[in-house]
Image: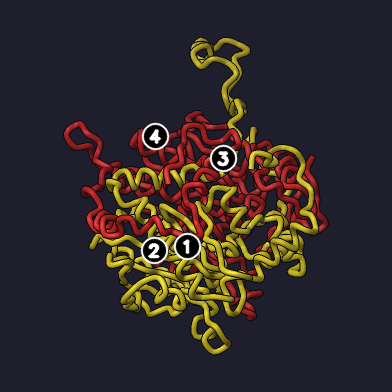
Chain colours: A yellow, B red
Amino acid sequence: MSDAPLLERATPPSMAATEEAWSRVQLARHPQRPRTLDLLPLIFDGFFELHGDRAFGDDPAIVGGPATLDGAPVMVIGHQKGTDTESNILRNFGSPHPEGFRKAQRLMRLADKLGMPVVTFLDTAGAFPGPAAEERGQAEAIASSIKLMTGLQVPIVVVVLGEGGSGGALAIGVGDVVLALENAVYSVISPEGCASILWRSRDEAQSAAAAMRMTAQDQVELGVVDGIVAEPGEGAHTDHGATGQALRAAIISALRRLSGRETTELLASRYARLRGMGAYLETGAVSPGRPKVPSLRRRIGRILHLPNVPRRPRWSEIWPSDDADDESERGA
Amino acid sequence: MPIKFPFSRRAAPSDAWTKCPTCDAQVFNKQLERNQRLCPSCGHHFRMSVGERIDLLLDPGSFEERDAGLESVDRLGFHDDRPYADRLETSRLKTGLRDAVVWGIGSIDGRRVAIGIFDFRFMGGSMGSVVGEKLARCFETALSDRIPAIVVSASGGARMQEGTLALMQLAKTTAPLVRLDDAGVPLITVLTDPTTGGVLASFASLGDVILAEPRALVGFAGARVASDTVGEEMPEGFQSAEFLLAHGFIDAVVPRPDLRASLSRLLRLLPVAAVEDGQPVSADRGRGPLGAISGLAERLGGAVSETIGIDVETAADGNGTGPSSPSIPGREEST
């Protein structure tokens, strides 16, 4: 994306881009799209689901356990959405509570202990925002999951299956290789949430989806996703078997690329990958608080009580408070 | 030129008075400035600018800002009702800041610290690439200089206008904390009003000690998002500093007049770990080649050439051009 806009003024997304982005969102949320538990038997052998975070409970919105991939043991963890109303209620529509992330952490520690690679599948609109989740430390659960993954001493391959929704996705989404299905999306906030904050209307979700550049291809261009796994036919929902086969090959290939590495090298390159995320300019501007008079001259001047030696300004004079609390500028 | 919105909570000019949202008292702004921005009648903690925070917490004249030249760029070409670049420019003019975090080296009662401070007035303190980069450098400097790190947060969360690049700042700011653990360097976070979303869901929740100011709004999801999603009104105060203290997620609620002294005491009580044999405590947690996965590769042998549907190599190359912005010199992709 060498023609990426940097400093020139952005324009609203075109109608075509908006339709394209929204159709991907629709496909990523398709009711027949294969979910983690649909795909596991197509990719792995002998998956044994483990339950519970050993502290509070078991969260059905995240599933995980050991399995083998072409004979080698791996730890598999993924969000789990339902396929109909009943199963969606059971799975809380794939939106985990803190105990889900803590279960994932427990499984990752086990993988770390036994030297098993970790494979995760992202498919959530986001971590659940209700009062119970807050009470049990949703933010802490996500933060500590991210931290655990950045230091895990085994290879991690992440696959964005459907919706990669914000912190709830990233909590099990820090990896050495991040793959995405062709029609998967990944975003910092749901398009509806973004629209309700920035456009002040959930009806603008389509515009928000386009503006956030959340398609898999966009994510490759931003460096967040490393590779795209093609979907069969009209989309993964048309052929679960072929989707599973494509994912299996891609995961094996990714793990093979990571296999020869020393642990220190693996961790160093994971660190470099995360550390390089983002876009900014390094301008030569200096701090407004930098003293304009050399400190030696100022110090001597002070001691000798010379006139016209300016004192260093207080920082609150440089950056004072004002009355402009702008409530419209919110984050996710 | 500050842009005023009709719904701005404090519409009065700064040389006049402000209405206290807690006790409805009319407070002169000059009085607020003299009083650590506390309401004189009820003690309500008004938000502070980054400059006021520096003067409050650090020894006079000790603070030296680092990386002052980092500036956000509009990588996505983001446009809602106006371009992201315009919002940045407005915030810069309004606050005199280049982005929502200032970091640098200062001292508290003579003890050097690497400190990052948020200013909520800059786009709601939202965390984009610059905020993430500054904090990562703050933590890395704490690591290399072996001095404690402190972050004072005030943020609505990740900056939506930077899309998943903003989301990735959660990981970018968290990754160095593993190294601080290994090296025995403490991190103290101070949560001020408000600290929500992606900032709370990353480094802010990961302090070795976490302090918060009284009645600060601290929570994962904004109350509006929560009630939209859950479809019920949220209970009063379920996202306050006191709520988090009661549920075991922070260590103390510290009123602003005691904050500096509390930090000073903690810095005395939580020393940076001693260095062994003249060597920094090793961050090498390696334990040799990855046995299991090496075996996997051998077993797979030539089978992987049958890989279909994906070419990770090509995609990774595309990745290299991804951050084509002048941003990341010397940081090689290595996936």
**Amino acid type for the residue under numbered disc 1:** Val
Identify the chain of the residue marked 2, using the numbered disc in the image. A
Indicate the quadrant where residue B42 lies.
bottom right
Can residue B47 be seen in the rendering of this structure? Answer: no
Other-residue count near label 4 (Cα within 10 Å), few / some / many at <14 / 14–19 / ≥20: many
* Nearest the eye: B16 or B285: B285
**Amino acid type for the residue under numbered disc 2:** Val
The secondary element bearing badge 4 is classed as strand
Of marks 1 and 2, which one's residue comes earlier in the chain?
2
The secondary element bearing badge 3 is classed as helix
Q: Which residue is drawn at 61% across and 73% down?
A: A29
Q: Are marks 4 and 3 on the same chain?
A: yes
Of marks 4 and 3, which one's residue comes earlier in the chain?
4
Other-residue count near label 3 (Cα within 10 Å), few / some / many at <14 / 14–19 / ≥20: some
Q: Which residue is drawn at 52% across and 62% down?
A: A167
Report the residue marked by disc 4: B112
Q: Do labels 2 and 4 share a chain?
A: no
Identify the chain of the residue marked 4, using the numbered disc in the image. B
* Nearest the eye: A37 or B18: A37
Q: Do the residues labelled 1 and 2 touch (CB within 8 Å)?
A: yes
* Nearest the eye: A42 or A187: A42
Give the percent coordinates (x, y) of residue A256: 35, 54
Give the percent coordinates (x, y) of residue A296: 49, 13
The secondary element bearing badge 2 is classed as strand
Q: Is residue A57 above or below residue B188?
A: below
Identify the chain of the residue marked 3, using the numbered disc in the image. B
Q: Do the residues labelled 2 and 4 touch (CB within 8 Å)?
A: no
Q: Is residue A169 above or below residue B335?
A: below
* Residue B321: mark in rendering: 3
Gap between marks 1 and 2, in whole Å? Answer: 8 Å
* Residue A119: mark in rendering: 2
Give the percent coordinates (x, y) of residue A115: 25, 59
